[in-house]
Image (spheres, coloured by chain):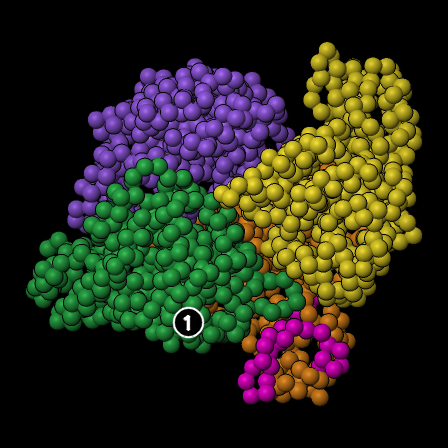
Chain colours: A purple, B green, C yellow, D orange
């Protein structure tokens, strides 16, 4: 019963086989290898974006902050949700990589940026002649940090507000595959066709060992990004092992199958939660991440039985909150046991 | 005939087996896993330093710049060799991670810092009352960036100059195992007993897939380092796969065996170079990296025959320079063929 | 009728005389001059803080960001009011000088930090084992950016919340003299005795030509501050002309007299506003800065008559908002004329 | 006998009168004042550069680092003389303001960049496909930090090497007027006509109270510069007092007269040095700054007699080195006395 994070899940066996295959012979270091170059072409085809540029790094935070730093001047502010990973969980990495840009926090339900609130925040940013903090990019998270999935129209509502003010848009897609499966749309539909300029296309949470991609649909950003990656110490010498993971991930729809399993487990777990007396889902459980509030005794019972998950602070009246995340390897039996223990 | 870099070499099979073994079940993310904690204990034993703190990241540059940033204030200068990786090959990452500290370049033969030149550079740094650039740490590279290995006495000569001026010492040990095998000494002898405070303990160039360690012999540096790693986006979620690589690497002397193979291939290759008419080793080939100058036609012949290596600029009189690196998987047959082609 | 800013007011004649007197002969540059050293002693006496360290710079933003950077690690967050100058008007200078620390915005009436909201924000900052954004200093502004003055008890309510969480406190005293006159207390009472660790002690808004001071009540911060000032390019060569301004400012209670004149003008202006039909003071006008909402036609009438002041955006229903600031040289006749024009 | 620095000299009386005149009435803060705007026009005329943009700050280091940061990406390196102020005396401010760019030190006689050495340094900077430290601007200092003055041809020799490699050129003109008077040429001849793109046009060392200008001959740099100035906390509220200083400085050739006096004093002092037995000028004394080596007893005699100047470290054989600087107010009588004391 391990629901702490999809990061805690195992690597898909196909990925191991790909890594071993990539180990044959020698390969030039630092991303000039054939595997990385072939993968970029594969991504361009997948996203129907023949000019897109792709970059690989080992950490999801690196994808976010390198992409954002490429889009942001140091005197600008990045607009993001108050609960977004870049604001809450990256230890000031966005401020560091942008050389001191600011984050402006925008509210909205279940981790989704409210377009009207965004518009108000953009409008409030100085347009004086006097130099002052200026508008930078908007960053939205899909699946949101509270487990909800933006519909295409909801993404467009955000990006069109941004575009009307001249701002670029970044998507933190740490759980990109989970969102895509939830919506049943194409990668292009959920990104550039919906107004996204740069994408953090995560893999580690969905069965990779440690590989994350950035896509710029505008290739003119590539030169800057490459230098930012290098000085950020994120250009790995043995890039071919990052490329191999994505190559396998994107082959034969493996990535979508893994995400579908995680989402199915998420739906089962949500159903289980609904069956617990006094339990409540705090946000739509659209993919593989649930936020719940339940009686403290349920929490205690689960932990005693060995369930692993993060608490989210105490609620009032003897209740408490928790986050539950499933992954491609979550077993039905574990969800069943969770239900039994929780229901007492 | 692939002599471009030890980075281009394959991953040792033992590492793959360890990665697969680490994939069983779930593990808490971000380094709180049991494997990382057990590895730290193993490193403490190996280095005879029970208080040492260990950190894992995916890139060698990250080990250098995170360790140096932890030891350096933004108004200080880091003393390093003019040919050091941190000066020549890290795209200003040290300046970035230290928030703007400076590098002071010191000369010395074959990539080794000359102690007298270091002392002069330290003496020349301001000690005025007026605030000005101040002395920061000294960073030396073992194996040097020109392929030589410092003796223990040579390391001590550098660190004692630094200590006399109150400066900490960092060792860039991207090829730590190769140096250790060359000297035949213990890890403690080559580090803290010789005056080293922080170590970049490389693994990727010696058969790992992508894992690098930092050791601080002074555990009081750990808090800062952890925050610098996180905001640098270098704390990986699936740390257990970094830990698994090092665990296997350090088990049963695998790391020393791999390095011994690379060094032996380096020695064979050096012998081959000496047999080429008009060829010359520019620096002592103490480990697995050779710098050569030879007639341009030798260079051409080798490249035509498929040899891969980095040029180092044109020398005069129809001669040119190159760098050749062996690794644990370099085959004798390739060296033999290299010799035959080169000798014409 | 110039109410745009106290920055727009003239320099007091005593300051000019002091500058000319300081011009006799030569003086050592960069703050090692006798005048700067004598001034520090004078400040120590004035603040009843014999160990305090004083630093002079030319800009108020520099005092804030250098003081805050000295108190803040790059992975920390600074707590400040959502309307504070450091958040709204310094073009990301705090983020720049701290190498990427974050600001956490706290609400409260009329620019005053609400202690309970501060406590909630401090409590919400991570205390996980995992490295994450950590608690940094609290910065409060006295006079607030909305014209109100904290009572001593109100300052203590904020600083005691901070102290209970282990956080240092900074006061942005750009209008320090105006607040002091409003409260009628001593400099020590309004600062270190009320829990303030570092003070931006402004002068330019109150009749100086361009001089601002920082005081650290804890002298152990001096070394860092001096280096941050120098690398920030804020150590002026001809410091003696900054020192001369403060020397004259603090002599014979000139500074308090200037502030008393500005506050008196502020009170008169507030009275005038209250007499305008449909006009409303949005915040307590405790010192020399007023925020008003009034009918658009009042606004238009005043501007046509030559009044200068900053608008604060349109309000609803044909009303609009403005900021009015008086200074030591504001003439009663101008206030009288303002009243006449405004009342129509 | 005060030869420590031209910074230690007095402010010219004309400057005081201008400051008092500027104090009439109110003026809008932060550089939107009429005086600043009129001054920019005056500078454009003076430099025969109608599109040039001008910015005022209070410190010379600020002019250098803000100008350079505007011209430099964080992954670039700035080429400058090994003895330049930006390398030796600014406490890592260039690295700070550029967010971590590097300085590459170039040698040359008497503080002048040797064009061939510059070309070699530029050629050695990576042009690999791999992202790495890239070429940034060249910065030269006129008067050099060792007291020499580049001829126009010498400036052109440097800037043409830079231009051939695609690099912009910055001139640190902390002693711009002294150089101009020494060469007897026009401001345009010594700057943009000679290939200079951005100029630090100093005033404080030549009789101002504290005002320094930056000129960009390419106005497209203005937007960035303005934001860098603001976030660097270098946009002063009472800009009109900076503008007033320059307005008076440039009126009726005051600036050239002040510099001519300083240079004349420098020439007299050089003559005096030449008359001292065993004394030697180490560099051409082209303007108002001398570097001397003389017997230690001369040094001692002068200091005992009250002469003030900076030592430059001990030379061998009972000799020592010193720097002597004159300014517009240096009295002939002091130079005469210097000669008498020194000659013993």
Secondary structure beneath dot 1 equals helix
Q: Residue at x 59, y 72 (%)?
A: D285
Quadrant that contains the C terminus of chain A: top left
Q: Nearer the viewer, residue A121 or C4?
A: A121
Judging by the rendered image, the residue that carries numbered circle 1 is: B194
In this image, D70 relative to D25: left or right? left
Q: Quadrant of residue B190?
A: bottom left
Quadrant that contains the N terminus of chain A: top left
Tell me: residue C320, above or below residue C77: above
Residue A175 placement (x, y as % from top left): 38, 28
Residue C283 placement (x, y as % from top left): 79, 26
Q: Residue at x 50, y 72 (%)?
A: B163
In this image, C207 relative to B333: left or right? right
Q: Residue at x 62, y 44 (%)?
A: C136
Residue B208 placement (x, y as % from top left): 27, 51
- What's the chain of the residue with tag 1? B
Residue C176 in the magenta stretch? The answer is: no
Q: Quadrant of residue C238?
A: bottom right
Residue D125 placement (x, y as % from top left): 37, 56
In this image, B232 relative to C296: left or right? left
Extent of the magenta region: D302-327
């Amino acid at each position: 019963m391990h629901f702490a994070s999809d990061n805690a899940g195992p690597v898909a066996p196909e990925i191991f086989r790909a890594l071993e295959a990539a180990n044959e012979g020698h390969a030039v270091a630092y991303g000039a290898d054939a595997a990385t170059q072939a993968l970029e072409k594969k991504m361009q085809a997948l996203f129907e974006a023949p000019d897109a540029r792709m970059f690989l790094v080992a950490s999801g935070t690196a994808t976010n902050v390198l992409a954002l730093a490429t889009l942001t001047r140091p005197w600008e502010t990045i607009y993001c949700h108050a609960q977004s990973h870049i604001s809450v969980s990256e230890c000031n990495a966005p401020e560091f990589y942008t050389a001191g840009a600011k984050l402006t926090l925008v509210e909205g339900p279940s981790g989704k940026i409210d377009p009207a609130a965004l518009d108000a925040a953009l409008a409030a940013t100085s347009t004086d002649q006097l130099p002052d903090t200026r508008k930078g990019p908007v960053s939205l998270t899909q699946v949101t940090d509270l487990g909800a999935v933006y519909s295409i129209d909801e993404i467009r509502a955000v990006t069109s507000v941004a575009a009307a003010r001249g701002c670029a848009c970044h998507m933190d897609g740490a759980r990109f595959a989970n969102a895509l499966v939830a919506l049943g749309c194409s990668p292009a539909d959920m990104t550039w066709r919906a107004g996204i300029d740069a994408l953090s296309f995560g893999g580690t949470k969905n069965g990779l060992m440690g590989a994350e991609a950035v896509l710029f649909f505008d290739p003119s950003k590539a030169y800057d990004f490459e230098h930012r990656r290098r000085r950020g110490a994120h250009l790995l010498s043995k890039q071919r092992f990052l490329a191999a993971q994505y190559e396998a991930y994107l082959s034969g729809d493996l990535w979508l199958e893994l995400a579908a399993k995680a989402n199915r487990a998420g739906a089962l777990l949500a159903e289980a939660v609904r069956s617990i007396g006094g339990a409540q889902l705090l946000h739509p459980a659209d993919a593989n991440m649930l936020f719940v509030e339940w009686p403290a005794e349920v929490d205690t019972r689960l932990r005693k039985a060995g369930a692993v998950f993060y608490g989210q602070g105490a609620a009032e009246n003897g209740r408490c909150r928790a986050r539950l995340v499933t992954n491609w390897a979550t077993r039905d039996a574990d969800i069943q046991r969770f239900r039994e223990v929780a229901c007492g």
